[in-house]
Image (cartoon, rainbow, N blue to C red):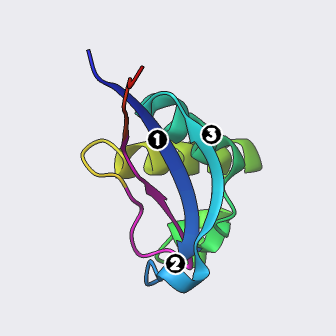
Amino acid sequence: MPKYVYPVYETDAWHSLEHRDCKGIYTSKQAAVNAIVKNHNIEDEDFYECIDGMEALTPRQRKAEIKKKLRKDFEIGFQTQSYTVNYDIEVWLINDWA
């Protein structure tokens, strides 16, 4: 059975290779997503179209809503989109050459 690792990169709004910073390597996509959700550097304002929508929530509600939106971003794809800071998850196959 093939083995994979999932490196996580923090990048800019354009997913530029020049501004990629490796934030960790994980053994599953789920672990990578959990790490991003817990440790992201995306500003709260990036998640809301208008500031009024954000201010109506308590800090705890805001945090929960942001986590939910980030998890939704990764349901199908391997990257976030349209934030000032974005995340890419790559999939690397580990060869078992012995």
Residue 50 in percent (x, y) is at 52, 78
Closer to the camera in the image, 85 or 51: 85
Residue 9 in percent (x, y) is at 55, 60
Label 2 environment density (alpha carbons within 10 Å; few <14, some 14–19, many ≥20): few
The residue beneath circle 3 is: 35
Is any part of residue 53 visible from this angle? no
The residue beneath circle 2 is: 50
Q: Give the range drawn in magenta.
A: 79-92
Residue type marked 1: Tyr
Whether label 1 touches label 3, CB < 8 Å: no
Q: Residue at x 36, y 47 (%)?
A: 74
Residue type marked 3: Ala
Q: Residue furthest front?
A: 98
Q: Measured along the vertical axis of the image, is residue 75 above or below residue 28? A: below
The disc, 3 or 2, on the residue closer to the chain's N-terminal end is 3
Instruction: Give the Cα distance between marks 3 and 2.
Output: 27 Å
The residue beneath circle 1 is: 6
Q: Measured along the vertical axis of the image, is residue 40 above or below residue 54? A: above
The disc, 1 or 3, on the residue closer to the chain's N-terminal end is 1
Q: Assign the C terminus to one quadrant of the image.
A: top left
- The numbered dot on residue 84 is none
Q: Residue furthest right?
A: 59
Q: Which residue is drawn at 71% across and 48% down?
A: 39
Label 3 environment density (alpha carbons within 10 Å; few <14, some 14–19, many ≥20): some
Residue 64 in percent (x, y) is at 60, 41
